[in-house]
Amino acid sequence: MMVGKDVSDISFKVPEDTYDTGKHTPTFSAYLTAIVRDSTGRVIHVHRQRSRSPTANFMYILLPLNWYTSTGQALTLTNATGGTCSYQPNVNSNAACIFYPNSHYNIQNYVVMIQVGSGTNSNPFSAHSLAAPIANGSGTGQLVYGTPSVSNTAIVSGSSAYFVIEQTLSNQTGSTIDVTEVGVITYIALVNTALSSIPGCGNLLVWYDALSSAISVPAGGGLTIAYTFTVNP
Amino acid sequence: MVASDAVNEEDIDKLIIPDDLPEEPTFKAYIEATVYDKEGHIIDYRRQPMKSLTQYFLALMSIPLIGTYSSSSSSSSTGLLANTLGLPSEISTEYVANITWAWSIQVGSGSQSFSPTLTGLAAPIANGTGSGQLSYSTTSVSYTASSISILGTVGNSTSSAVNVTEIGLTCTVYIQYSTSGTSTYTCLLSYDTFSTAISIPAGGMATFQIVISFTG
């Protein structure tokens, strides 16, 4: 059967639930919460904003096999230092796919950190690193990064479900440090089961947000950042 | 999980500046259905919001976000993969393993209340040419910088109309082993019902497209 006629053939009543960009039902939301504490541990500011920006690295990894097998193409993952690796998953022993935990041979894919910075990327999708990352340390302009934690399961509440990525940073300098951008950095390594190709893609920026207003972390204070990802909010 | 040791909720609410949160949803998704008669004429078209992603969508999207390992030194999978998606916490019998996944669109003739833990359609329509069945073509996927589109096509090779009342985006996860073996796991990523049944006439066909947009 040919699908040859154009839409002028259409003769039907549009249903009432037709998509309306202004009034549709939320399907998925992401937001970040930043909690600032002073040197005594008292909460002095909470910043909350919608998060909008998966990067190209995120999209390329999320894409299912359907795209890769139908196009026959690979996509390039670019790490935070500009290094690249080619990603073209498939179901065969020669295709390099993401490592899965096993008891013998592992190169861990894991969330490295929620990184903060003092710059702004104008095009988050194509960003591979923060514009001006704040280094881990106690030197001038630096923050001490804690270890990120992730919900151990999706938390279901009614028709909604969510999980959280959270990390705390501390300002051990004598000056206030301003944060204007936030990103999630995840290490990704690939392997094929023939073990002939084991590319380490490195630290990938997979999610990025420029803050709607700068967050000031006072000397001796701390910053806790939480990303919350929710379906059917 | 956030700041349980902060101050009380009322005080925190006063400290939230800015509070840029939904009513506005961050991400949009919708479903389009187009029905053709046996001569290729469009006879019905629907476009409706996609309302119902499941917890398994969350778990799958956690892979590009946080990887597959629970830490930099662990040989265990993340809790989201093991506890939510139901994948092994560790492959114990193989030298190496990797993971990938495919998506497909499935339609059905039933309906059920939504839960984020739903694992399947109420009454899936089988792939085939027998009574009440539809012939599924390969699901295709495309993407832009801000969205992923999934397109499924079904043909009705029977002599009677087939009614579609529900639709799901399903996932097949492949874990491949160094012995060339592969384990497969299936999950339901989304579930929606149509406000009125979509009737695919004998000899006709329909396309179903799900678009997930990552821009707010």
Image (cartoon, rainbow, N blue to C red):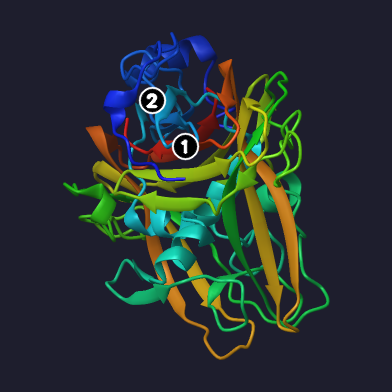
Secondary structure found at label 2:
strand
Instruction: Tell me the number on the disc at residue B13.
Output: none
Secondary structure found at label 1:
strand
Q: Are marks 2 and 1 on the same chain?
A: no
Q: Looking at the picture, how far across and down is residue B107, in whole percent?
A: 63, 35
Q: Looking at the picture, how far across and down is residue A4, in whole percent?
A: 33, 41
Instruction: Tell me the number on the disc at residue B210.
Output: 1
Q: Label 1 crowding class (10 Å Cα cut-off): few <14, some 14-19, many 20+?
A: many
In this orientation, does residue B66 appear?
A: yes
Residue drawn where x is 37% and y is 24% of the image: A44
Name the residue nearer the viewer: A211 or B96.
B96
Residue drawn where x is 44% and y is 52% of the image: B141
Left or right for A58, reference B69 = left
- Chain holding disc 1: B
Label 2 sits on residue: A46
Q: Looking at the picture, how far across and down is residue B136, in whole percent?
A: 61, 47
Q: Where, by quadrant of the figure, is residue A53 drawn?
A: top left
Q: Is residue B100 above or below residue A221?
A: below
Cα separation, mark 2 vs mark 1, equals 36 Å
Q: Is residue A87 above or below residue B148?
A: below
Which amino acid lies under the numbered mark 2 shown in the image of this protein? Val
Extreme-right residue of the structure: B93
Q: Where, by quadrant of the figure, is residue B21 drawn?
A: top left
Q: Label 2 crowding class (10 Å Cα cut-off): few <14, some 14-19, many 20+?
A: many
Name the residue nearer the viewer: A171 or A7.
A7
Which amino acid lies under the numbered mark 1 shown in the image of this protein? Ile
In this orientation, does residue A151 appear?
A: no
